[in-house]
């Protein structure tokens, strides 16, 4: 009589496998499950020769410029724009800079812009059956040696992306630079709901947090 030893670990193995499957199914995909906050990126750039501690005063625009496809579309002042301007003002003051009226000759000018760009492209559907291996059999229809061809379809797509841009301009040395106003610092925020009023303060703070050198007390 053939005796087979029972597998005592089979139940445990099944449970362990189910746990692994459940864990894999619930695991967060870092690309597909980003929150709006996680999707936003912050980029800063500055003149490495600038000595930010030599600037003491600033003035900021009272509205936000709207730039679409490299063209000025005027000014805008809504809830988002107001929150951004207030946040920039508070962050500059926390770094030791003093706000003055633009008529007082500030060292720094601050421009805030909503920048949007439209990207257009073309896609096409070539021979469908050629791409997928010709799974229709022409012999079935009594036409040996014939092929099947899909209509050639061309489509156009349009994508619009935007971002918040903040520029610090050097007014203090404009005359010495041949009456040219030089940008000393630029901050750019992009991502989902970047123009939502509730996100304005956090976006501005993130840009300043990346820029410890932007300080009049250094």
Image: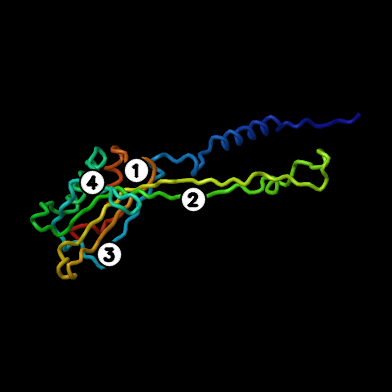
- Residue at position x 63%, y 34% in the image: 16
Q: Residues within 10 Å of mark 1 (few under 14, many from 20)?
A: many
**How far apart in space, not on screen, are marks 2 and 4 (Cα)?**
29 Å
Q: Which residue is mark 3?
A: 47
Mark 4 lies on a secondary structure that is strand
CB atoms at circles 2 and 3 under 8 Å apart? no
Judged by depth in the image, the label closer to the viewer, 2 or 3, is: 2
Residue 122 point in image, percent of width and height:
52, 50
| Residue 194 badge | 1
The numbered mark, 2 or 1, whose residue comes first in the sequence reads 2
Separation of disc 2 and disc 1 at Cα? Answer: 24 Å
Residue at label 2?
121
Residue 160 falls left or right of residue 187: right
Tell me which corner region of the image, top left, top right, bottom left or bottom right, holds residue 210.
bottom left
Of marks 2 and 3, which one's residue comes earlier in the chain? 3
Q: Choose mark 1 or mark 4, whichever is in front.
A: 4
Q: Secondary structure at mark 1?
A: loop
For the point 71% across and 32% down, the residue is: 10
Q: Position of residue 103 (x, y in %)?
A: 9, 55
Judge from the rendering whether residue 133 lies leftward or rightward of residue 217; answer left or right. right
Residues marked 2 and 4 touching at CB (< 8 Å): no
Question: Which residue is identified by label 4?
Answer: 75
Q: Which quadrant would the C terminus be assigned to in this image? A: bottom left
Classify the position of the N terminus by image quarter. top right
Is the residue marked by circle 3 packed among few (<14), some (14-19), or many (20+) residues within 10 Å? few
The answer to whether 74 is drawn above or below residue 178 in the figure is above
Please tell me how crowded label 4 is: few (under 14), some (14-19), or many (20+) other residues with Cα within 10 Å: some
């Amino acid at each position: 009589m053939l005796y087979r030893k029972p597998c005592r670990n089979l139940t445990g193995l099944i449970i362990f496998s189910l746990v692994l499957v459940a864990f894999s199914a619930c695991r967060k995909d870092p690309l597909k499950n980003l929150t709006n906050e996680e999707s936003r990126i912050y980029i800063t750039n500055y003149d490495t020769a600038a000595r930010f501690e030599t600037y003491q005063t600033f003035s900021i625009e009272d509205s936000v410029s709207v730039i679409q496809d490299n063209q000025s579309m005027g000014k805008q002042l809504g809830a988002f724009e107001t929150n951004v301007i207030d946040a920039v003002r508070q962050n500059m003051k926390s770094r030791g800079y003093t706000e003055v009226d633009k008529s007082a000759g500030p060292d720094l000018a601050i421009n805030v812009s909503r920048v949007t760009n439209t990207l257009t492209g073309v896609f096409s559907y070539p021979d469908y059956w050629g791409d997928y291996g010709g799974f229709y059999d022409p012999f079935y229809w009594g036409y040996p040696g014939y092929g099947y061809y899909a209509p050639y379809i061309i489509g156009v797509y349009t994508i619009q992306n935007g971002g918040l841009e903040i520029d610090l301009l050097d007014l203090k040395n404009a005359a010495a630079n041949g009456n040219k106003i030089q940008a000393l610092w630029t901050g750019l925020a992009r991502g989902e709901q970047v123009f939502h009023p509730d996100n304005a303060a956090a976006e501005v703070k993130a840009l300043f947090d990346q820029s410890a050198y932007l300080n009049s007390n250094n």
